[in-house]
Image (cartoon, helix red, strand yellow):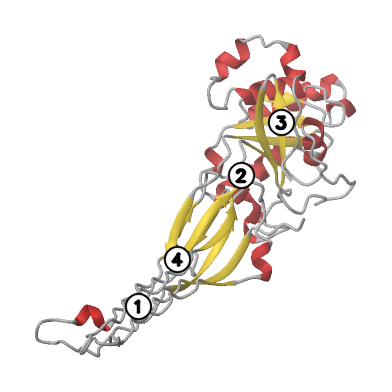
Amino acid sequence: MHFLDQAKIFLKSGAGGPGAVSFRREKYIEYGGPDGGNGGRGGDIVFEAVAGLNTLIDFRYTQHFKAQRGAHGMGKDRTGASAPDLVIEVPVGTQILSEDKEEVLADFTEVGQRLVFLEGGMGGRGNASYKTSTNRAPRQHQPGEPGQEMWVWLRLKLLADVGLLGLPNAGKSTFINQVTNAQAKVGDYAFTTLIPKLGVVRHKGREFVLADIPGLIAGAAEGAGIGDRFLGHIERCRVLIHLIDIAGNDPAEAMRVVQAELASYGEGLAEKPQLIALNKVDLADPELVAGFTEELRAAGADEVFGVSGATGEGVEALLDAILGYLPGRTATETKGSEVDDAADQAGDWSPLD
C-alpha cells in the first residue's frame, strides 16, 4: 500500500431543490388553488474517522467531492426528496486544514468520530407556501439555496503511543522488527525507511503502538535529507525513543543533532519525555558502552538504555520503562511491579497495516 499523508481536495455540498409552481387541477373542483411543494434539502458533506486506514492515498486519485442537490418540489403539495449526505471516510488522526494551511478546521482522533463539515442548501419554497387571504393564486417560488464549497487540505498524523527516531542507520527498522511483527525494510545504507511505519508492541500484558519515522539529519528543518515533514506523525506520542548507533562517530553529537531538529520543528516535540537507547551494544565491549553512556548523561540524557535490535539484548528493560508513560500506570509503579511472565506470552496480535 502506498503512503500519503497530505492531500488537497475540493468539497461542495448539495444545493437545495427549487420549489414548484403548480395549481390544483381536479374534476368538479373549480379554482383549486396553488399546490406547489417545497424543494428538498441538498446533501451535506460529512467526514467520518474509520478504523483500518492509515494513508490518504485514495485522495490522490479523487480530489473533487460534490454532494447531490435536493429534488424539486412537485404538484399536489409534494415536497422534493432531500439528497443523501456524502460521507468521506478518513483515517484516525486526520486533520482538515484551510486552503492556506493556517487554520485547523477539524481533528479526528477517535474511531467513529463524525462531523458535518459543509451543510447542504435548504430547499426552495413552492407557491403553495405563498398563499394568503389576499394572494389566492401566487406564482412565485424559490430556487433553493446554493451549497457551500471550499478547497481544504487533509493532513494525516498517525496516532501512536511511542515514537521512534534517530539518525539514519541507527537501527530503527531492526528495532521495530524485533519488538513487533512489522516487516520494515532493513538495509546497509541510509534512509532505508522512506515512510512512517507502525507496529503493535505487546509487553507484559500491555499493548501500545510504536511509530518509526525516517531518519533525521542536520538541517532537516531546512529540507535536508527527507526533511522533517514526518515529524508530525510523532506529535501525539506520549514518549519518544531516541535510538543512537553506538558504532557511530560521536553518540553525544548524534543526540544533539536530533534534539536541535526537534527544537527547530517545534510543536512541543523537544519537551516530550525521551528515552535514550544506545543501539547495537552487541557489537561493542562493556567498557565502551559504559563510556558512551556517561557521555550521553553529561550531554543531558536522563536515562540511557543499552539495547540491541538484532539480538534483543536490553530491549525488555526499555519496554518496561515505556510502560510507565502509558495510561493507567506510573513510571514508579511499572519499575517496582512484578508481572507474570506467562501473561507476556498470552494471546496473539498483528501490527497495523
* Disc number for residue 145: 1
In front: mark 3 or mark 4? 4
Between 310 and 24, the residue placed more toward the observer is: 24
Q: Secondary structure at mark 1?
A: loop
Q: Earlier in the sequence, mark 1 or mark 2?
A: 1
Across and down, in percent, residue 250 comes to 77, 38
**C-alpha span from label 1 to label 3:** 52 Å
Residue drawn 61% across and 71% down?
63
In front: mark 4 or mark 2? 4
Q: Earlier in the sequence, mark 3 or mark 4?
A: 4
Q: Which residue does the numbered mark 2 point to in the structure image?
A: 234
- Give the class, few, some or many, for how many residues have Cα within 10 Å of label 1's Cα (few <14, many ≥20): many
Q: Which residue does the numbered mark 3 point to in the structure image?
A: 201
Q: In the picture provided, is 327 more to the left or to the right than 25?
A: right
| Kind of residue at badge 1 | Glu
Mark 3 and mark 2 residues within 8 Å of each other at the beta carbon: no
Q: Earlier in the sequence, mark 4 or mark 2?
A: 4
**C-alpha span from label 4 to label 2:** 33 Å
Q: In the picture provided, is 235 more to the left or to the right than 23?
A: right
Q: Which residue does the numbered mark 4 point to in the structure image?
A: 44
- Give the class, few, some or many, for how many residues have Cα within 10 Å of label 3's Cα (few <14, many ≥20): many
Q: Earlier in the sequence, mark 3 or mark 2?
A: 3
- Give the class, few, some or many, for how many residues have Cα within 10 Å of label 4's Cα (few <14, many ≥20): many
Q: In the picture provided, is 338 more to the left or to the right than 182?
A: left
**C-alpha span from label 4 to label 1:** 13 Å
| Kind of residue at badge 2 | Ile
In front: mark 3 or mark 2? 3
